Amino acid sequence: MGQTLTEKASSPTSAELAWGRRYLLVRPDHFRVDYRINPYMDLADQPDAALARAQWDGLVAALVGAGASVESFDQPADAPDMVYAMNLGLAVTLESGAPLAVMSHMRFAERRRETESARRWFVSRGFGPSYIGRDGVGAHFEAGDAFPCGDALVVGFSPRTDELGLKAVATELGVRVRGLRITHPGMYHLDLAFCPLDRDRALVCPAAFDDASAQALLALVPDPLVLTEAEALTFCANAVVVGRTVLMPACPDRVRGILEGWGFDVVLVEVGEFHKGGGSVRCLTNPLDIVVGRDLPAVPGGEVLLPL
Ligand code: ARG
């Protein structure tokens, strides 16, 4: 008993995330910067195909090394941004046990070409597909905006996902959605400013949001690691967590010190060619093992909560 108490008091760790052990990636066979839909994309600065492929292979090896399983498929030639697999859709297992993929309805038409081949892949893996924005309802949803955290799916909105999209996701999944308004042009998806680390902790960059949303997010995470804007712009929050391993494209010394103090292993993964399209480690990986009822509560019918 005494020993348990001592262990608890001195332990820097908290319960690991149950999800984040199975990922979808898209092999960069046709990765290019063909258009500009975020501030990082510059048509004059194209990725080197061989280097991008080598970096992607390194990311896959790092994921597997951390204990994750990886599935991938070949990139269609007409979808140069499809390497950012995080945005294809949100895959969950519903409370009923049925796997469901809520396909993204991308804000920019250039990326909507990705949806049909992504849908076929999810179906081939047993995920029933569901469509945001079908039937002419103009909802937008991009899955890089959505993560389970606390009692809800937190979903960033404004640059990409919109308020109709929040409602549609909440209804499709039967979960509580907490919307967070993103205002920073360089952090246009939630996954550039927020990364759940374990049950109590997350990387959070308040500068990405309006004041009410920043406060709401900080209130939701018991023990946030607050990033400055400069730290977040290294793409360090665009990280993937597998148990107690954090795979990051960069890690400022201050951030590393805190993560290691909390018992995480930081693994740096070089994916600089993919920064040319405006995405990093997390954007390239889509978790397939989120479970409603385990990782976030089921709320029949769904509900959306917005900061005031
Ligand atoms: N070029 C892509 C876009 O603008 C990059 C996506 C980055 N992905 C992410 N999950 N943040 O849509």
Image (cartoon, grey):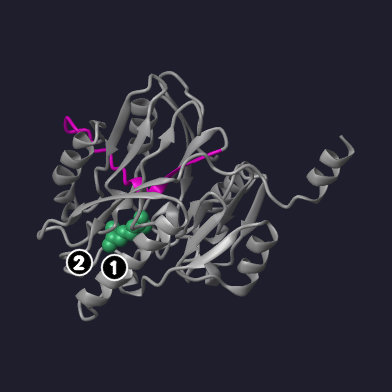
Q: Which mark is residue 235?
A: none
Q: CA distance from mark 2 to mark 1?
A: 9 Å
**Dot 2, crowdedness within 10 Å: few (<14), some or many (≥20)?**
many
Disc 1 element: loop
At 62% from the left and 45% from the top, the residue drawn is: 221
Q: Which residue, given by chain and number where applicable, does mark 2 sit on?
A: 31
Q: Position of residue 67 (x, y in %)?
A: 46, 51
Which residue is situated farthest in the left direction here?
77
Magenta run includes residue 139: yes
Disc 2 element: loop
Front in this rendered view, residue 111 or 162? 111
Question: Nearer the observer, disc 2 or disc 1?
Answer: 2
Q: Are marks 2 and 1 in contact (CB under 8 Å)?
A: yes
The range drawn in magenta is: 133-149
Residue type at numbered disc 2: Phe
Residue type at numbered disc 1: Gly
Q: Position of residue 113 (x, y in %)?
A: 14, 50
At 54% from the left and 56% from the top, the residue drawn is: 245
Q: Is residue 136 above or below residue 228?
A: above
At 61% from the left and 67% from the top, the residue drawn is: 255
Q: Is mark 1 within 8 Å of ligand 1?
A: yes
Which residue is situated farthest in the right direction here?
2
Magenta run includes residue 50: no
Q: Position of residue 94 (x, y in %)?
A: 38, 26
- Give the quarter the ligand 1 occupies: bottom left
Q: Which residue, given by chain and number where applicable, does mark 1 sit on?
A: 277
Pick the quarter of the image with the N terminus: top right
Front in this rendered view, residue 125 or 103? 125
Front in this rendered view, residue 250 or 140? 250
In the displayed structure, does residue 169 sit left or right of residue 43? right
Whether residue 157 is visible, yes or no, is no
